[in-house]
Amino acid sequence: MEVPQAAAPSANNWQHRTGGRGSRSDCLVLSARQRNRDSGASIEYGGVTNEERSKARPASGSLGSVALFGVPVRFHFTFVLLLIFLLFIGIGGHQSGAMTALYVVGLFASVLLHELGHTLVARRYGIRTMEIVMYPIGGVSRPERQPSAREELPIALAGPLVNFGIALALAAWVTSRQGFVALEKLAEPTDANLAERLALGNLMLFLFNLLPAYPMDGGRILRSLLALRMPADKATRAAASAGQALAVLMGLAGLLWGNFILMFVALFVYLGASQEGVAARGRQFTAGYAVRAAMITDLKTLQHGDTIRDAGNLLLTTSQHDFPVLHGGNVVGLPTRAALVRAMLNDGPEGYVAGAMDRDFARLRPEMPLSEALPQVSSPGACALVMDDGDQLLGMLTSENLSEFVLLRQAAEAQHRAHPA
């Protein structure tokens, strides 16, 4: 069984679908315009470069951003909650509030330097880091492409080695001043043992990140070693399975010992490993196909002068949730369902969709490999518009129909194994 490639629609047939598979909220738009410049060719998306586009769309749940070495560093709200929690439990006893804050900042800086270690080594291989997101279990770097097995090994090792270097430097400094310090003396936080506890914290970060389970660096190292002997996606699934198994053990240990933090970390590890396993399966079944193969070719659109009432009628009479807005045949914006609902509340049904649409949307070409488009439409409710080099709307790619495409590919492969030709 083969999954048929979707034919490119004509200029007149993509407007007439009333009962097709709908898109969902938070839609991205796919297409690309190639423009040559004196300095070389560059891809632009509605006047915004791909690099700027990546920076403009932060990870979900992130709060604030700072730039280091040209890389946006964002803070997930759970990471902020963890910092507050550490400050709360640290204040009091034999440690002053100022030293408690300094200790938390020191740990934060250690995690950030860890991620910058990944970033700088990846840069040596020509892999740009799109963003760094700080989570309670550590930072997560998002590269612009998946490194090869040989590239990933040094990139994954770089972060833990940064923490080991910090621990070694702090330990050497403390030893030169006062000799070795017994570990039992570090059980009670004081202003005097701040450096020793930071050294111990970095040593723990080094060891924890080397656990051979995804999404820790040890899991990435395991994946890179496995990928030298097997397909990359199969190696990813093996490392993700190891991560899930470790998370279950950590969760059980936290439950038996009454350790809330360990249970919290186990949850994040399990979710991270599960997501990567799903992503690997998606890459496996979309490999070799272009975006054109999975896109919806019939969809409803709105005109620039249409009202919120017109958009609401389409929401009720079709299964789409997001509608491209056209002006003179060109796509000029994209209002999501959430934006339309807000506009209905704020402006009423006679307001214009032009005031609710997102004018700054990303575009990629239909010839783009489907496996590369996967991250942009893999989250629940995500969608993308597919456009050609001339900015003509060709179709829509949603998380729903992409999932169905993967299911069809799985069924085709199972059928082939059961009844080989």
Image (cartoon, rainbow, N blue to C red):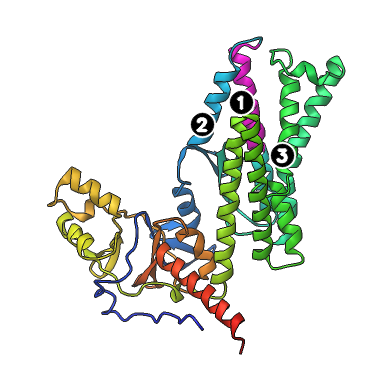
Q: Amino acid at mark 1?
A: Val
Amino acid found under the numbered disc labelled 3: Phe
Q: CA distance from mark 2 to mark 3?
A: 21 Å
Cβ–Cβ under 8 Å for marks 1 and 2 = no
Quadrant showing the C terminus? bottom right
| Depicted 24 relative to depicted 32: above or below | above
Inspect the magenta stretch and tell me whether residue 102 lies in it: yes
Q: Residue furthest front?
A: 256
Compare residues 261 and 173 and report the one nearer the observer: 261
Labels 2 and 3 touching (C-beta < 8 A): no
Q: Which residue is mark 1?
A: 105
Picture coordinates of residue 4, whole percent (x, y): 45, 82
The image position of residue 210, as x and y in percent, is: 74, 44
At 80% across and 21% down in the image, what residue appears?
183
- Range of magenta residues: 95-113
Residue furthest bottom in the image: 421
Q: Residues within 10 Å of mark 1 (few under 14, many from 20)?
A: some
Residue 295 in the image, given as x and y percentages of width and height:
40, 72
Circle 3 is placed at which residue position? 208
